[in-house]
């Protein structure tokens, strides 16, 4: 159960759960599948899209956390200084909020469809919010 299908805008990506590096985050996320929301472009972090989740509590702390996710890496910020969120990097990201530097748990990595990742990010930037859905593959 380590493969995830990510449908974002008109694109479909394959993804791998990072179960060894972030087991608690992966287990918490799996409980929310299918996960359906909208992505919007980040405001402070660079080339990324995010799912704002308000005060949704996944019940996890930090594990495998980073402030600099690489393109195709998906992180979960469990909340605290800023609201809970999921962020997908499509280019250079320095994860932050209006409160300053943040770090999130790298729990999911895109493995296929990467040729569409940058295009997805730019479409969200220029055209606005897009649907996103996470399912077991």
Image (cartoon, rainbow, N blue to C red):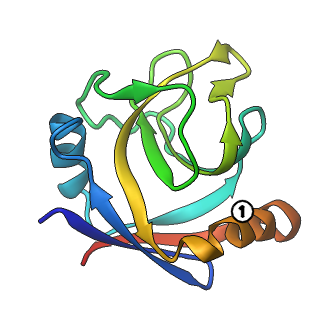
Q: Quadrant of residue 112?
A: bottom left
Q: Is residue 49 above or below residue 24?
A: below
Question: What is the quadrant of the C terminus in the image?
Answer: bottom left
Of residues 75 and 115, the one drawn nearer to the viewer in this rendering? 115
Question: Where is residue 18 shown, x and y percent of the image?
Answer: 25, 47
x 62%, y 67%: residue: 117
Of residues 64 and 134, the one drawn nearer to the viewer in this rendering? 64
Farthest residue toward the bottom? 10
Question: What is the quadrant of the N terminus in the image?
Answer: bottom left
Of residues 127 and 137, the one drawn nearer to the viewer in this rendering? 137
Question: Where is residue 5 shown, x and y percent of the image?
Answer: 35, 75
Q: Is residue 35 above or below residue 76?
A: below
Q: Which residue is mark 1?
A: 121
Q: Please, what secondary structure does the residue beneath circle 1 have?
A: helix
User: Label 1: how many residues lie within 10 Å, few (<14), some (14-19) or many (20+)?
Assistant: many
x 58%, y 51%: residue: 71
Q: Is residue 42 above or below residue 109?
A: above
x 24%, y 39%: residue: 25
Farthest residue toward the right? 126
């Amino acid at each position: 159960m380590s493969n995830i299908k990510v449908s974002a805008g008109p694109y479909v990506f394959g993804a791998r759960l990072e179960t060894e590096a972030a087991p608690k985050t992966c287990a918490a996320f799996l409980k929310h599948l299918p996960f359906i929301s909208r992505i919007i472009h980040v405001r402070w972090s660079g080339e990324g899209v995010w799912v704002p989740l308000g005060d949704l509590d996944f019940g996890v702390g930090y594990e495998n956390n980073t402030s600099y996710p690489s393109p195709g890496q998906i992180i979960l910020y469990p909340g605290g200084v800023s609201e809970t969120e999921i962020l997908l990097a499509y280019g250079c990201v320095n994860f932050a909020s209006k409160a300053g530097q943040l770090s999130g748990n790298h729990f999911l990595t895109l493995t296929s469809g990467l040729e569409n990742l940058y295009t997805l990010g730019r479409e969200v930037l220029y055209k606005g919010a897009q649907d996103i859905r996470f399912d077991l593959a």
